[in-house]
Amino acid sequence: MDGNGRWAKQHGLPRVIGHRRGATALRHVVRACVQRQVQVLTVFAFSSENWHRPETEVKALMVLFMHSLRREVEKLHEAGVRLRFIGERGRFDNALRQKMEAAERLTADNSCMTMVIAVNYGGRWDLAQAARALAAEVSAGQLALDAVNEQALGKHVALADLPEPDLLIRSGGEQRISNFLLWQMAYTELYFTPTLWPDFRVDDLDLALTWFAERERRFGRVESTQPRVGHA
Ligand code: FPP
């Protein structure tokens, strides 16, 4: 969800207003994804690198997360959305951590769509924590060294229980992954749009879905498979 800061600058507003408008854009996109029967929607809300932003912006983002959770969780629950958070939670304050856990508990049995919010998440962190978990199994004698392979590591990365992402949408014009789901996105179709996130509307989502539907997905093979967005 890139481009909140630039959107604010273009409108002569503080960056935090850009993030607030970004939260509004997200609300519309989530609703549209449920309507379009997307199985899993993962959003990158705060990267491990975002702590390096000015303290006032980091604080404002934390307030916005808390406010958004207070405001949205009940509505998401009613819409049948299961909420999950991925990332290193230890750095967040207690109140926010408790709110995330409560949201996960409340919505655990919902099945319309899973919404994953990546907070203090980094793809390299994810791989390192998966490697640590595997190493612990080996050192406890639960796993043979020879059994350390892609499948074994894949069981420990975030979202291991969910289908791999089919489509990545990055707004804001940059064409890079920025340490998002590095392992999980090995075969993800990458869609980049110059639209700044606060301006991203349901029409932009539909453009991305239409683009995706025309992709030929071969997964390294010769024959293609029929595209269908399960995880965006
Ligand atoms: C990147 O834009 C955006 C963020 C770091 C924050 C994203 C947060 C939201 C959209 C708020 C709502 C989210 C939830 C889960 C409630 P940027 O600031 O890097 O923009 P720039 O590249 O134009 O500076």
Image: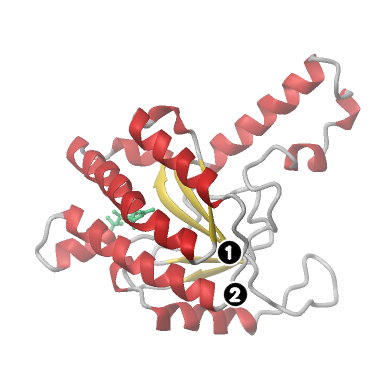
User: Can you identify the residue that label 1 sits on?
Assistant: 113
Closest to the observer: 71 or 193? 71
**Would residue 14 appear left or right of 73 to someone viewing this image?**
left
Q: Residue at x 62, y 53 (%)?
A: 109
Give the answer, above or below, for where 13 lies relative to 142.
below
Q: Residue at x 41, y 54 (%)?
A: 73
Q: Quadrant of the N terminus?
A: bottom left
Q: CA distance from mark 2 to mark 1?
A: 7 Å
Label 1 C-beta lies within 8 Å of the nearest ligand 1 atom: no
Residue 132 appears anywhere in the view: yes
Q: Please provide percent x and percent y for residue 181.
A: 57, 50
Give the answer, above or below, for where 166 lies relative to 62.
below
Q: Quadrant of the C terminus?
A: bottom right
Q: Residue at x 11, y 61 (%)?
A: 13
Q: Secondary structure at mark 2?
A: loop
Residue 54 falls in which quadrant of the image? Answer: top left
**Would residue 43 appear left or right of 158 to someone viewing this image?**
left
Disc 2 residue type (three-letter): Gln
Mark 1 packing: few (<14 Cα in 10 Å), some, or many (20+)? many
Residue 213 falls in which quadrant of the image? Answer: bottom right
